[in-house]
């Protein structure tokens, strides 16, 4: 049994009926399943976290449609590899054979020139491209290629999905079916998996190997004890990718530069994409610092641009400087809560009409029916301010922005009180 592939590979589903999760895409009557069953398959991008079945789904599609399957990984493939696959596909097309599916794992790691090399083949239909990415394709895939692909979002697996995988493995796997495994408690297993099926099965196999013999009893305590001793420090391919970046963000949010730089170092040593790190810091600069220190966003943007131009290893100095600055900066999430409240209000109240005094009146008719009537140009008044209502009548007086408790926003709060009086009581 020592030459067997890992449990996650042994349990890889072979068809859509065995596929676990993603019911919104491949359940009965779902959009992607309909496309597969019709045989009219567009090029597509699968976007989702590790271990949710992106590679497996691509392979199942090829098998279901009896189409050749070419797979490349963006980590170790270049333009030359892409062109070789396209040439093979072109020969198949000339010979009237079934056209292949080209699966590219981690397509977000392809450079612009590598992605450009795919355009012609995708446009002509020489290949059907299926790209897999853990990153937002809007940022990572060039617009010309993205416009030719349908984007499908894959979700982390639900607890029921993960537990059904374990039951199936214990019942059907060539190794596990001969053992008596009693899962007394499953909270630790599920938490450690993070919705990642591959990670769950890898952990489960590690535990089975740790407990010698045919009778195995798993509890939260012994699961945590064995997993913490054996798990890899960092796996940029997915095993602890989200755990580490979570610790990194929370350390900066919690104003701990020691923790933040430590987790930064873990990612650097693990080979994480420095642009991924810099991009997450850009988000944090607005989400968690915001107007408590607007310079944080400027520095994070400068960091992102510098890392993009300079590359590693020198960029680790720029990353470290920015991490320390963000961690030690005052914090405010008022911008985050304000836009969240505003979006919730829009969804609740719908398309409320714009008050007439805020509308432009480019024609005489519009002016005659009241467009722009009563509008006061702020700069024509003392202090460049005039008391007007800027919300629709139905929600007039609603408070959306709540300034944070920090020096800069306290100053803004006082100014709003002075200008608006009772309307801005906090």
Image (cartoon, helix red, strand yellow):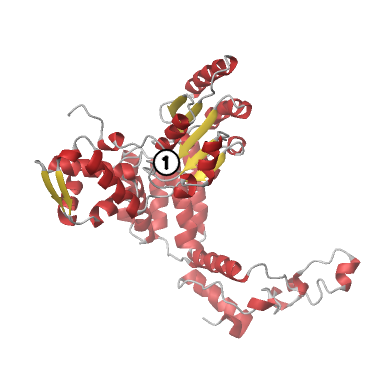
Q: Residue at x 44, y 47 (%)?
A: 22
Relative horizontal placement of residue 402, taking residue 51 as reference (left or right): right
SS class, disc 1: helix
Quarter residue 422 falls in: bottom right
**In this picture, is 235 found above or below 88?**
below
Q: Residue at the right extreme?
A: 364
- Residue at (55, 33) in percent of width and height: 39
**Residue 95 vertical placement versus 115 (above, below):** above
Instruction: Give the image quarter of residue 53.
Output: top left
- The mark total stands at 1
Residue 252, x across and y down, in percent: 37, 57
Mark 1 residue crowding within 10 angstroms, few (<14) / some (14–19) / many (20+): many
Residue 256 appears in which quarter of the rendering?
Answer: bottom left
Where is residue 338? Give x, y as percent: 53, 68
Q: Is residue 136 visible?
A: no
Q: Is residue 274 above or below residue 115?
A: below
Instruction: From the top left corner, tell me how far across and down residue 298 is, in percent.
Output: 52, 53
Which residue: 24% across, 55% down?
188
Residue sitting nearer the eye, 284 or 128: 128
Q: Residue furthest bottom?
A: 422
The quadrant of the image that shows the N terminus is top left
Q: In the figure, is residue 163 to the left or right of 102?
A: left
Q: Which residue lies under the disc numbered 1?
A: 274
In the image as oriented, which residue stretches furthest toward the left? 213
- Please give left or right for residue 352 compared with residue 405 in the image: right
Q: Residue at x 70, y 73 (%)?
A: 384
Query: For this rendering, which residue is in front, 228 or 332?
Result: 228
Q: Does residue 378 sit above or below 171 in this rendering?
A: below
Q: Is residue 113 in view from this perspective?
A: yes
Q: Depth check: 80 or 55 in front? A: 55
């Amino acid at each position: 049994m020592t030459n067997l592939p890992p449990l996650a590979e042994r349990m890889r589903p072979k068809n859509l009926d065995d596929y676990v999760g993603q019911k919104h895409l491949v359940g009965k009557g779902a959009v992607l399943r309909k496309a597969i069953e019709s045989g009219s398959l567009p090029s597509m991008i699968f976007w989702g976290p590790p271990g949710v079945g992106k590679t497996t789904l691509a392979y199942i599609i090829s098998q279901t449609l009896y189409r050749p399957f070419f797979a490349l990984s963006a980590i170790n493939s270049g333009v030359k590899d892409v062109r070789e696959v396209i040439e093979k596909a072109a020969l198949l097309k000339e010979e009237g054979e079934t056209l292949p599916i080209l699966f590219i794992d981690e397509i977000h790691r392809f450079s612009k020139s590598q992605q450009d090399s795919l355009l012609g083949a995708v446009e002509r239909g020489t290949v059907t491209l299926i790209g897999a990415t853990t990153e937002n394709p809007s940022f990572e895939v060039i617009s010309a290629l993205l416009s030719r692909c349908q984007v499908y979002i894959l979700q982390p697996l639900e607890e029921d999905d993960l537990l059904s995988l374990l039951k199936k493995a214990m019942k059907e796997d060539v190794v596990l079916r001969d053992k008596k495994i009693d899962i007394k408690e499953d909270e630790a297993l599920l938490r450690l998996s993070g919705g990642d099926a591959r990670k769950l099965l890898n952990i489960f196999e590690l535990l089975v190997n740790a407990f010698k013999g045919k009778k195995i009893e798993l509890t939260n305590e012994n699961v945590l004890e064995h997993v913490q001793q054996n798990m890899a420090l960092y796996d940029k391919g997915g095993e602890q990718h989200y755990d580490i970046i979570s610790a990194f963000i929370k350390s900066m949010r919690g104003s701990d530069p020691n923790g933040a730089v430590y987790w930064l170092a873990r990612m650097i040593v693990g080979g994480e994409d420095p642009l991924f790190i810099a991009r997450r810091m850009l988000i944090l600069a607005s989400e968690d610092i915001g107007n408590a220190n607007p310079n944080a966003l400027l520095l994070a943007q400068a960091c992102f641009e510098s890392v993009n131009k300079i590359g590693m290893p020198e960029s680790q100095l720029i990353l470290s400087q920015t991490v320390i600055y963000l961690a030690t900066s005052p914090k405010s999430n008022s911008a985050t809560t304000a836009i969240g409240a505003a979006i919730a209000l829009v969804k609740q109240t719908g398309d409320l009409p714009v008050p007439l005094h805020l509308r432009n009146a480019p024609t005489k008719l519009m002016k005659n029916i009241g467009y722009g009537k009563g509008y006061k140009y702020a700069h024509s008044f003392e202090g460049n301010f005039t008391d007007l209502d800027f919300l629709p009548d139905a929600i007039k007086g609603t408070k959306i922005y709540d300034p944070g408790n920090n020096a800069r926003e306290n100053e803004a709060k006082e100014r709003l009180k002075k200008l608006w009086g009772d309307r801005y009581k906090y």
